[in-house]
Image: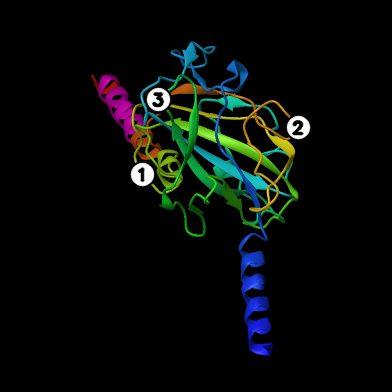
Amino acid sequence: MKKIIVTTLIGASVALSAVAQGTVNFATGATAGNRISTNNVVGGAAAGNTAASAGLYYYALFASTSQTSVNGTTAAFAGNTANYVFNNLGGGTTSTGWVLVGIGSNLGQLGRFGPISQGTTSANQSSTLNGDGSLTVSGTSAGGTANFVSVGWSANIGTTLASVEAWYGLNGQSVPTLGWIGQSAVGIGLSLGDGNTLSASSSMGSGTGQVPGYLLGEVVATPEPASMVLAGLGGLSLLALRRKK
């Protein structure tokens, strides 16, 4: 009898530990203000929602229990800037900075996306869906709250967060000549699910702590520093030759 009780307690303990962290959904709803848009001119206004064909855009969701801004910015922005959350993660945990929660991709509907299971997406995080389609928010308490921010980009940049980091030259990679990228506003104080009786809230929306739709802005890649130096040296050489003549 004692063995049965001990075994039951151990099983309960394992079950509780599995849902000890908070959960969240990562998908846009049908409301127009929650959808993702793009522009067709660098620095231009939104020209329409993302295309209905699936797999053309990817999205990353980040969470923190300590940060209420990204590099001092709380508003959404698009295009070429160093303020993206993947450049400003902080201390590597939700209590010290921003942490990757999971990855999404656009659905076969204008301006909408949902979460995808993608396996390992960085050194310490994975985009693995729970049974109810939610994502586990590492370093949070079940039923607690967290702050969220999302980044979206066009598929020609890549399909993982690592590919976006490389696109920005963090890994010394070359970049495509054209892409679309943007970051949402920061949602503060979203209630989390517990994987059991508390359903996971959607991180996207217009309610308390949710993130509204945002713009992916067109970016034309600039030459790498080495290329710019070579171009500058070439220009100086031509100028020297002209002076000799």
Image location of residue 244, percent across then percent down: 26, 23
Mark linked to residue 6 = none
Q: Is residue 163 above or below residue 185?
A: below
Q: Which element carries disc 3, helix, strand or loop?
A: loop
Mark linked to residue 173 = 1
Residue 82 visible to the viewer = no
Name the N-terminal-most of marks 3 and 1: 3
| Quadrant assignment for the C terminus | top left
- Front tag of 2 and 3: 3
Q: Which residues are magenta?
A: 230-242
What residue is shown at x 55% (from left), y 44% (from top)?
Answer: 86
Q: Residues within 10 Å of mark 1 (few under 14, many from 20)?
A: few
Is-magenta flag for residue 237? yes
Name the residue carrying label 3. 108
Image location of residue 149, percent across then percent down: 63, 37
Residue 114 visible to the viewer = yes
Q: Label 1 near label 3: C-beta < 8 Å?
A: no
Name the N-terminal-most of marks 2 and 1: 1
Q: Which coloring applies here?
A: rainbow
Q: Amino acid at mark 2?
A: Thr
Is-magenta flag for residue 59? no
Name the N-terminal-most of marks 2 and 3: 3
Q: Label 3 near label 2: C-beta < 8 Å?
A: no
Q: Amino acid at mark 1?
A: Gln
